[in-house]
Image: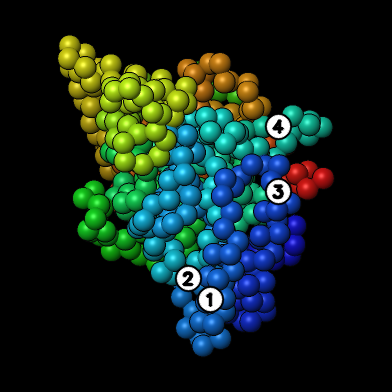
Amino acid sequence: MSDLTNLTLAQARDGLRKKEFSAKELTEAHLKAMEQARALNAYVAETPEKALAMAEESDARLARGEARPLEGIPVGVKDLFATKGVHTQACSNILKDFRPPYESTVTANLWRDGAVMLGKLNMDEFAMGSSNETSCYGPVKNPWKPQGSDEDYTPGGSSGGSAAAVAARLCLAATASDTGGSIRQPAAFTGTVGIKPTYGRCSRWGMVAFASSLDQAGPITRTVRDAAIMLTSMSGHDEKDTTSANVEVPDFEAVLDGGIKGLKVGIPAEYRVDGMPEEISRLWEQGAAWLQEQGAEIVEVSLPHTKYALPAYYIVAPAEASSNLARYDGVRYGLRVEADDLTDMYELTRAEGFGAEVKRRVLIGTYVLSAGYYDAYYLKAQKVRTLIKRDFEEAFTQVDALLTPATPSAAFALGSMSDDPLQMYLNDIFTVTVNMAGLPGISVPAGFSEQGMPLGLQLIGKPFDEGTILKLAQGIEQAAALDLTPQPWWQA
């Protein structure tokens, strides 16, 4: 790994402005790192020509003293975000060879601010998965391995490519998306920072939809400061997205300087689940102690409907997926399997185009929306969702934010849960409540497992109060003071 790829986004930004190196040199260093790291399978499409052209434009602007907020910063883009004329497949065969004639709002915001696109990142197919094993391009490998092990581990999902690329220094930051934990869980598994903003903070226009009332874009970065910088650029009102919130975007980086003294942080009793590993419990206590030492007040709170969140989520999300994925029929774009009549063409195209997990969720979703079951399942799940949201509203009358574990364990070996979807779904136990209530949540690295794998803590905030959880996350980051550099085994 070169010195340039080891820089944080903030360091690279400052170095570019001081003319210590050029945007082209920074981009070339990352392109070389990507070449040497193909064993990780993090990128599914590399765009070196586009990256170098964008870097040259950035160098010209830097020379004129016209630097934009992300001028010359090389980033990776999750394959869920439409990139004009560039491979956009949501890592599904059904979108084979799709190159959209438009740009997603989130990526357009990044290019507007001067960022450089390195390529498209691997992910679970249609963002459905917690291990990046459902991708039609195969699994991403976690840059981290347990001490003394040669086994490949998951980087988490669905944003596994984004998290692995950031952890392995293959980009300075990456776009990601979170429907039930798909930013925060991979961040926790790879020793990176992942923030899922409030629903509506970042536009969903040009993102391949999974569950429209839950999906939210956000960044994965090396540090909390980098996450704040990326979030500022990615956010903003968008008239093309009816769920986009017309609220002012603060300078999230400036918010970090405020300190956390006097903030009240809640510890929800219901997150102390049966069978939680001792190392997760210890880390949670340690995180609370760190925040207390920095002047925050720790308060016990209750979120009584937490235990219903996971089952309700796995009704609401598949129901919305079944509706959203009905558009993939082989008629207008993507894969088409020729047949004698239209119905056969639909069926054969979907049978070949969708992977097993996507089919499973579409079937569940179609079932819970069908006549006779809609009231029993979907309507009931929406009522539970309202109760979960109310729990948070009540808790936030007492505290400014909540502290919980990010995941129930450290990363697990690839293939170890593939045959047990229910066990896989339990990976989202600490994260789905945040999506159900539309709240902001952040995962920040806080320690290591006994095997030397990264562990994260989660902070949950009030709607559109990302600034508070960013400040608290920075407090944990500074107290933990971890070396989050994985050994580059993939270069061997």
| Pick the front one: 357 or 19 | 357
**CA separation in Å, label 4 and label 3:** 14 Å
Sequence order check, earlier mark of 1 and 2: 1
Residue 451, relative to residue 377: is it above or below? below
Q: Which of the numbered marks, if any, corresponds to residue 152?
A: 4
Residue at 55% of width from left, 54% of height from top?
119
Q: Is residue 340 visible?
A: yes
Sequence order check, earlier mark of 2 and 4: 2
Q: Secondary structure at mark 4?
A: loop
The amino acid at mark 2 is: Gly
**CA separation in Å, label 1 and label 2:** 7 Å
Return the residue at label 1: 58
**CA separation in Å, label 3 and label 1:** 26 Å
Return the residue at label 3: 37
Give the mark toward the camera: 4 or 3: 3
Residue 366 x, y percent position in the rendering:
28, 20
CB contact under 8 Å: marks 4 and 3: no
